Image (cartoon, coloured by chain):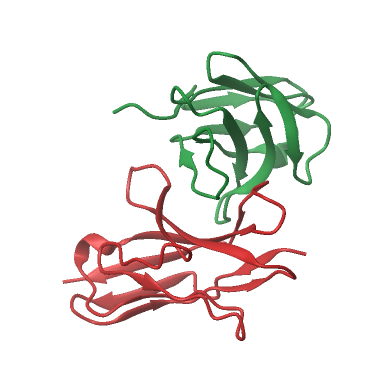
Amino acid sequence: AQRVTQPEKLLSVFKGAPVELKCNYSYSGSPELFWYVQYSRQRLQLLLRHISRESIKGFTADLNKGETSFHLKKPFAQEEDSAMYYCALSGGNTGFQKLVFGTGTRLLVSP
Amino acid sequence: ETGVTQSPTHLIKTRGQQVTLRCSSQSGHNTVSWYQQALGQGPQFIFQYYREEENGRGNFPPRFSGLQFPNYSSELNVNALELDDSALYLCASRPSGVNTGELFFGEGSRLTVL
């Protein structure tokens, strides 16, 4: 079964502090992992994909197949990073059918 | 901004009623999927349509049905509404020729069932 676990409902940090939003997944094949973000009063949007291996808005995420994790990291949090973050998985072997989302982590960055 | 638009944004129904939610995606986005997001949860896949045919379905009963039209619009229909159907319903589209999980979401239709 495909499952995504985000253990923290809320992560509160001060501006300039490092941030790590945890994501663990369960999938028997080769998954494709994503982070989606929803800023206040905006729609859900893609932040980054593990395949592209790029840094978006200072955020990075590395797929660790041994630990089945895809944690999102940023060295210095900014107030504008405050948002709801969802980790998501799709089955890479059989082509895209659906995204399986975690329950989300709310990141609150205080000044 | 062009993108995925959904209507209505909010609606209230009573148990047993039927509802139709609508979505309009961008030109060239021939795959559309619908997700249900209950309060405090992540979005949950309902089904996906490609070229006007359903080609993937999540764990939802048959009273959840959909349609996709040639003009890139689509509908989600829910019959015999139950209280647990209260949720935010999200439409998401994907460009032609792209076979990844990079989806473009609408702002959602919030359904309340009383």
Position of residue B39 in the picture relative to residue B77 (left or right): left
Q: Is residue B89 above or below residue B52?
A: below
Q: Position of residue B33 (x, y in %)?
A: 61, 36
Q: Nearer the viewer, residue B102 or A45?
A: B102
Q: Give the residue at the far right of this rendering.
A: B62
In this rendering, the count of numbered labels is 0
Q: Is residue B12 above or below residue B35?
A: above
Q: Residue at x 62, y 21 (%)?
A: B75
Examine the rendering and report whether any part of residue B66 can be seen: no
Q: Give the residue at the far front of this rendering.
A: B97
Color of chain A here? red
Q: Quadrant of the C terminus of chain A?
A: bottom left
Examine the rendering and report whether any part of residue A1 can be seen: yes
Chain in green on the image = B
Q: Position of residue B7 (x, y in %)?
A: 49, 22
Position of residue B70 in the picture relative to residue A41 (left or right): right
Residue B66 placement: quadrant: top right
Position of residue A75 in the picture relative to residue A49 (left or right): left
Q: Residue at x 79, y 46 (%)?
A: B59
Q: Quadrant of the N terminus of chain A?
A: bottom right
Q: Is residue B88 above or below residue A51?
A: above
Q: Position of residue A47 (x, y in %)?
A: 38, 57
Q: Position of residue B71 (x, y in %)?
A: 53, 13
